[in-house]
Image: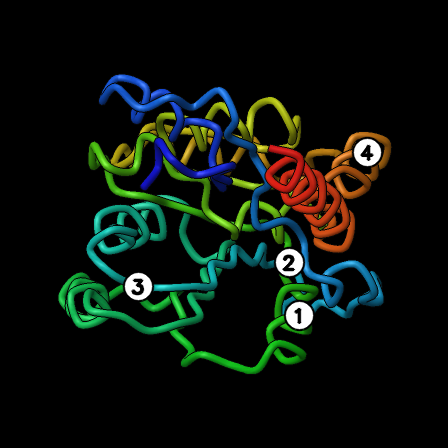
Amino acid sequence: MLNSASGVNVVSEAFPEYFKKKGINTSNWSFFPNGIDEEFLSYQAAAKKTHKNVTTIMYAGNIGKGQGLELVVPEIAKLVGHSFRFVIIGDGGAISLLKEKLRRENIDNVEILPPVSRPELIELYLSADIMFLHLNNIKAFQRVLPSKIFEYIALKKPIVAGLSGYSAKFLQQNAPHAFLFKPGDYDAGTSCLLDAVGSQVSEINTNTFIAKYSRSIIMEQMATQLIDLIGASFDD
């Protein structure tokens, strides 16, 4: 199916290499990632801080084995103390592990909230000082590109991320305000968090990224390519 397709699109540039090793011709493949939804481009950037003198670190998304939040968040929260506050928004198969570890370690500067609507999520995003992301050190994750990265960069806030593989490379290349550590290394994660406090985010870099990866632009480019592919197939 892949070899006979007129075109194949991937949401991560790390995928073609994998399939090429399997003997599949990827010369006609394209890269159009998830991009940034319009809601994250039209929000109002001003937001009131709800916790004075406390730095809020926020994660929103799935809370599963793949994210491995239970491996790093409790430990980082303990190390940084009460001048920092984690807000974790979401649900998933590992949420009980995270809650149990927080309870067992008597950690009270981590708040877990259930999934919320998109407008509510953006409001919560705006109240944060630092965005947080973590993926477990699993081989399959070496090639993925989480859509969360696009949202986080568009928010123009410092990012602390425990990533490896292609997603780490992509973030380094596109977000100078991202502080990366190896998955599971909570000591390095703590250092990254402290470095991120008060760091500057380049308007020029983020605006360039938004102009390249907004969902409307990606869809327009993808539609143009599909039309070209259809036209070429009729010519054949």
Which of the 4 image quarters holds residue 144?
Answer: top left
| Secondary element at tag 1 | helix
On the image, the x and y values in percent for residue 126 come to 70, 64
Residue at x 59%, y 59% (from the top left corner): 54
- Which amino acid, by three-letter code, is at mark 1? Ile
Distance between mark 1 and mark 3 Cα atoms: 19 Å
Residue 63 is marked as: 3
Q: Position of residue 42 (x, y in %)?
A: 83, 65
Is 118 on the left or on the right of 13, as rendered? right
Mark 2 or mark 3: whose residue is earlier in sequence: 2
Between disc 4 and disc 1, whose residue precedes?
A: 1
The type of residue carrying mark 4 is: Thr
Disc on the earlier residue, 1 or 3? 3
Mark 4: few/some/many CA within 10 Å (<14, 14-19, 20+) = few
Q: Is residue 120 above or below residue 1?
A: below
Instruction: Classify mark 2: helix, strand or loop.
Output: loop
User: Marks 1 and 2: which is nearer the front?
Assistant: 1
Q: Which mark is residue 208?
A: 4
Instruction: Give the mark, 4 or 2, whose residue is nearer the N terminus.
Output: 2
Quick one: SS at disc 4? helix
Amino acid type of the residue that numbered disc 3 sits on in the rendered structure: Ile
Residue drawn where x is 29% and y is 38% of the image: 141
Indicate which label's residue lies in the foreground, 4 or 1: 4
Q: Quadrant of the C terminus?
A: top right
- x 52%, y 26%: residue: 28
Q: Dividing the picture into quarters, in which one does residue 184 lie? A: top left
Residues at marks 4 and 1, CA–CA distance in whole angstroms? 21 Å
Indicate which disc, 3 or 4, sits on the residue closer to the N terminus.
Answer: 3
- Distance from disc 4 to disc 2, alpha carbons, whole Å, reads 32 Å
Is residue 188 shown above or below 40? above
Q: Are circles 1 and 2 on residues that touch, CB within 8 Å? A: no
Q: Residue 122 bears which disc, if any?
A: 1
